[in-house]
Amino acid sequence: MKDEWFRWEREAAIHFLFPTLEGSMQPLKIFTGHGFPTTILIFKNGIVTWCVKENEFYGLGAKLLEIYKDPKKEKQMVNEATKRLNFLVKVEQEIGKSKLSKLSNESLVDLYSKLHESFINYYGIGAIQEPLAMQAEIELKNTNTSLSDIQINSLTSPRKISYIKEAENYLWKTKNIELFIKNYYWIDNNYSQTKVLSKTDVKQKLKHIKQSKKINPLNTKNLNLNDEILRLVELLKNFAAYQDERKRNILIYLHFLEILLKEIGRRGNISLETMRDTFPSDIKNVLNGKILQGFVKKRKQSCFVVWKEKARKPLILIGKNTRVWEKKLSPKINRQTQIVKGNCASRGKAKGKVRIILSANENNKLKDGEVLVTFMTSPDFMPVIKKCSAIVTNLGGITSHAAIISREFGIPCIVGTKNATEILKTGDMVEVDADKGIVRIINPTVSS
């Protein structure tokens, strides 16, 4: 039976990820006329599963794509996103300059609200990117079946290198650790926690810098592509760059969000770790002593968020109340198959043992030459990406983090398998043929 749900899974704390859902709903609808369809988030012991019906997700992508096929509309979007980002940056600067411990509770709440509102307002435009890019990829393949995945990858590679490669190039060129920290202190942040880089962190980065593989884009003039296809190529190229820039801005925002959460938690006698699993609507109650640490910890164990398409607020369930919904959303997996299929993101072939990594906290488990298999990669996966022989992900398209980074570093990569983390097991010996988008199990492991 075909699974009707599109699932986006990764490590995440509630307060770090929930604002992206807020931005995907009403702010996106106000800006484009189309908000996300009914969306369900399952937070369970530090892992989130973001669920939306696949046909509705791609339906949203089709509506957004129809709007931004018009270059003028795309330009207007970029200009508005820049304005909203500038306002977000101003709020972040205000937080950086403020002596938070001296602020009254009311002033602290006001500052938090300014950051929160400016972020979801910015993300209301950023939420366009995944559904549009994934639908554009489908249309490009359907419009011109003569283009291979490898050709499409080359055609749609962004003109600008990723911020991760930009940071590495800067460090390699300058060798200036203090300046690197000043400019990229936020680069190891993720949806679970933040950290400010130390000199030791940067020395380790300098030690393990891996030179990228030069990408030579195809010359579209030799392919006889019509205007419709050229526009889809241009959109995918542009939106890959937009997504990368959005990720950079999210990591910086998380730094300032955590600064506020730490101060709010201190006043409410709640640890920073626990504050990460509060909701924005909890802030005043934390300060008033109406939210207790034990209650918030239950959310981390199991918290279910369902936001219906036309609702102004989501339904939030915790504990046993989440089980019936989780059962409805459980994917049906054929565990007998010996082949996993996906899409080529970066060409090449590799053979090695599988290492399932579901959290960046497990990075130290991957050994040199193993095949990284995960839900989807993110910047905090870079230490293992540099060691693996290939990457296989459940999710993502040609503009995803895994696709862009794997091409920059010349690592074979297959994305969009949907079920790689369920079919493959740690220790399986596999052959990865990224050119064909196939992972074949050679020798399954007896146990993981």
Image: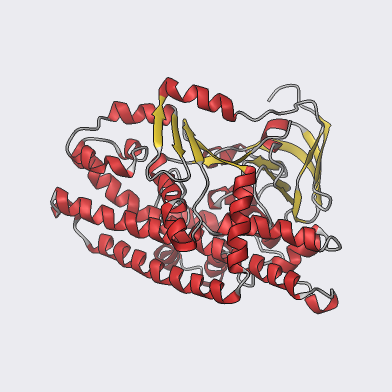
Q: Nearer the viewer, residue 197 or 188?
A: 188
Q: How many marks?
A: 0
Please give left or right for residue 74 compared with residue 192 in the image: right
Position of residue 6 measured from the top left corner of the image (x, y, whole percent): 62, 41
Work out which quarter of the rendered image holds the N terminus and state it.
top right
Residue 405, visible in the rendered structure: no
Residue at (55, 62) in percent of width and height? 244
Position of residue 431 measured from the top left corner of the image (x, y, whole percent): 82, 41
Q: Nearer the viewer, residue 325 or 297?
A: 325
Work out which quarter of the rendered image holds the C terminus and state it.
top right
- Chosen colour scheme: secondary structure
Residue 96, visible in the rendered structure: yes
Relative to 330, does residue 199 appear above or below in the rendering? below
Relative to 71, does residue 274 appear above or below in the rendering? above
Relative to 413, does residue 152 appear above or below in the rendering? below
Q: Nearer the viewer, residue 175 or 251?
A: 251
Q: Residue furthest bottom?
A: 221
- Residue 418: quarter of image: top right
Residue at (21, 60) in percent of width and height? 98
- Residue 199: quarter of image: bottom left
Position of residue 30 measured from the top left corner of the image (x, y, whole percent): 43, 59
Residue at (47, 49) in percent of width and height? 190
Position of residue 269 measured from the top left corner of the image (x, y, whole percent): 21, 35
Please give left or right for residue 285 compared with residue 52 in the image: left
Please give left or right for residue 38 compared with residue 139 in the image: left
Residue at (20, 32) in percent of width and height? 290
